[in-house]
Image (spheres, grey):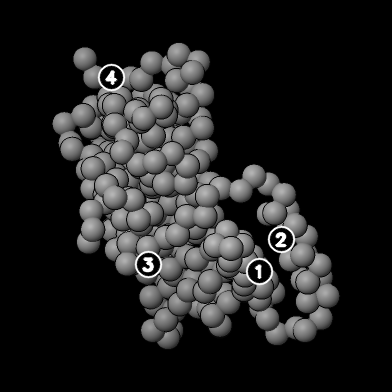
Amino acid sequence: MAAQTNLWSRFTLRLGGCLFLWWVLTGGNTLTSWIIGVPTIALALWVMQSVPQSENQQLSLPGLLRFIPYFLLQSVRGGIDVARRAYSPSLPLNPDVIDFPLSLPPGRPRIFFLNSVSLLPGTLSAELCDTILKVHVLDRDIDPGLNQLQTHVARLFKHPSGGNR
Amino acid sequence: MTVTEIITTMLLLASLPFFLAGTLGLLRFPDLYCRLHALTKADNLGLGLVVLALIFQADNVQQIIRLLLTWLLVLIAGATVAHLIARKARGDGHKHWSRQ
């Protein structure tokens, strides 16, 4: 029974998402665009149904609201940091590859973390070996702050390692 | 010039140094891994500023969402491709450059 409800809520979410996306893409003024839109959405939903389903993982809204400003700030810092290094005549780089132990569960949280790492200042996810993420850092003397990012991602995916806050 | 046009111009001008830095890093940085840093991070910030600049010129909500979606998709694509290139390079046995 619970699984059935879950399936329905997922379908509703996807349908809503598709309708919203089509409205955004077409400008929403022309009713005729739905002649193409409705079959396209039906096809999209069918494709989504046919690929392997991941666990239905709910995101935490407070987690997301905290992640977005953190991420934006870090992206700006990351861009400025790498630009400064590129412009500097002495090319201030001291790269290394470090091992970062992951406490996030496999699947979406881990992939999300992996991609976020590459957009943070001075870090690039180079390789995932089981529960160790090999991270290429531009400056080995600077703490990349990956633990903080991991806590943020854990909160976002409601994983216990993110604490209860 | 209206206020929004001035804001747009300032943001577009602010984005230029970052696109230039991305290219400069690609040419100047010593190895593949460092170059990926320059390309992903500097260009993402540059594009973010362009998107922000264009949001001030948007006529309706759909255009704003479209711009934000574009940025988000480029962000995801950039991070994913950077990781795939780095992983392949490590698999091929590329050593990272280090200062001795």
Along the viewing direction, whichever of B29 and A58 lies nearer the viewer: A58
Question: Where's the C terminus of chain B, which quadrant?
Answer: top left
> How would you rate the neighbour count of disc 4 (Cα within 10 Å): few for under 14, some for 14-19, many for 20 or more?
some
Earlier residue among tags 1 and 3: 1
Q: Which residue is mark 4?
A: B98
Q: Residue furthest front?
A: A1
Q: The disc numbered 1 marks a residue on which chain?
A: A
Q: Which residue is mark 2?
A: A45
Label 3 amino acid? Leu
**Is there one chain holding both mark 4 and mark 2?**
no
Q: Which residue is mark 1?
A: A15
Q: The disc numbered 3 marks a residue on which chain?
A: A
Q: Is residue A63 above or below residue A159?
A: below
Q: The disc numbered 2 marks a residue on which chain?
A: A
> What distance separates the C-alpha of mark 4 from that of mark 3?
41 Å
Disc 1 + disc 2, Cβ < 8 Å? yes
> What distance separates the C-alpha of mark 1 from that of mark 3?
20 Å
Instruction: Please tell me which residue is depicted at 23% across the width and 27% down the height of the picture.
Output: A94
Q: Give the side of residue B70 with respect to residue A164, left or right.
A: right
| Nearest-to-viewer mark from 4 and 3 | 3
Percent position of residue A122, x then y: 29, 39
| Nearest-to-viewer mark from 4 and 2 | 2
> What distance separates the C-alpha of mark 4 from that of mark 1?
50 Å
Label 4 amino acid? Ser
Q: Which residue is mark 3?
A: A61
**Is there one chain holding both mark 4 and mark 1?**
no
> What distance separates the C-alpha of mark 4 from that of mark 2?
49 Å
Secondary structure at badge 4 equals loop
